[in-house]
Image: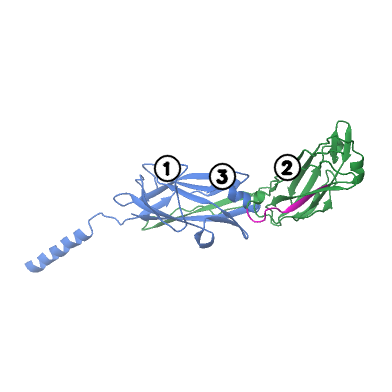
Chain colours: A blue, B green
Amino acid sequence: MSVRNGLAALCACAIALIGTPAGAQSNNVRITGLADVAFGSLTGGDVSRAQNVCAFSSTSTKGYRVTASGSGASGAFTLANGGSTLAYEVQWNKLSGQTAGTGLSPNVALTGQTSTATQQQCNSGPATSASLILIVRGTSAAAASGGNYSGTLTLVLGPE
Amino acid sequence: MQMLQMKRFGAAGVAALLACSSFAAQAATDGNFGATSQGTVGISASVPSRVQISKLTDVAFTNQDPASAASNAQNVCVFSNTATKGYNIKATGSGTSSAFTLANGALTVPYTVEWAQTTGQTSGTSLTTNVALTGQTSLATTPGCSSGVATSASLVVKMSTAALESMQSNTSYTGTLTLLVGPE
């Protein structure tokens, strides 16, 4: 290798190191610790179910956004019983142990969230980092047809 | 002239719970570690069969001419959340053995009760005390008819000329009619 070529190789290496610093990772996220939600028999009044989850972000700010979509039409937050539907609300709180949060709209990202999680599944550090709250309003349940309702809620995290 | 007052109608709604059979929701899944991470939560809930009767008003037959039968019809709301919007209705009076009678001390006078599953009626199916009239359906879409139809059924209370003629003049007779609705 000539001196010139060697210098070129060194420059290329230096550029490569600047472009991809040794040990750096992509901006990744992970949501874990999710549990099914059973509202039980809705006999009157608002019914709320809160759960603590682990939302991890590997970005320098630990930032993330969360987007929720239900199994109703166009991602609506509705449960179904045949042709009958039962609406519910979804709230998110970037802190664990909360029973209220910011209301989410289907397919609309809630941005500006930060996590205290230090491990992608919260296996070390805080056991959970955020709160997911689902609510069925009494007015919705009162107007709904009798029967058993079910559905799914999908949550997507993205890094920020 | 006779004076008759029916002071108050009681109302009752019945909530009959469905047996809460278990029904599986999709199991929750955690997200993977990546540029985005998607998790899912299964959700389940049950709504028991429920009914409600509302918009009842008191009935007063005042200074009634005994030569003419008296009738009072009112529009009420019955809501049923069953798939068929079905319900049954049972009426009981405040007389002996729940008889449809008004009283003033030991004095009593009978009245009759009719029910129509549609609103705006002046007659309907005659009710027997403590016997359910089944097979009724409602057009109400919300409890209390807060939206949709304003009322859904008709309650008709009548007094015959014979009953009116049996009453003591210048005497107020009072009683209570209780209506109990159940889902079908």
- Between tags 1 and 2, which lies in front? 2
Identify residue type, mark 2.
Ala
Determine the secondary structure under disc 1: loop
Q: Give SS at disc 2.
A: strand
Q: Which residues are magenta?
A: B147-157
Q: Nearer the viewer, mark 2 or mark 3?
A: 2
- What amino acid is at disc 3? Asp
Q: Which mark is residue B12?
A: 2
Circle 3 SS class = loop
Residue A148 in percent (x, y) is at 63, 53
Dot 3 corresponds to which residue? Answer: A46
* Depth check, front residue: B139 or B159: B159
Q: Position of residue B180 (x, y in %)?
A: 76, 44
Identity of the residue furthest to the top in this view? B105
Q: Which residue matches tag 1?
A: A96
Q: Does residue A117 appear left or right of residue B6 in this picture? A: left
Q: Looking at the image, is mark 1 or mark 3 nearer the viewer?
A: 3
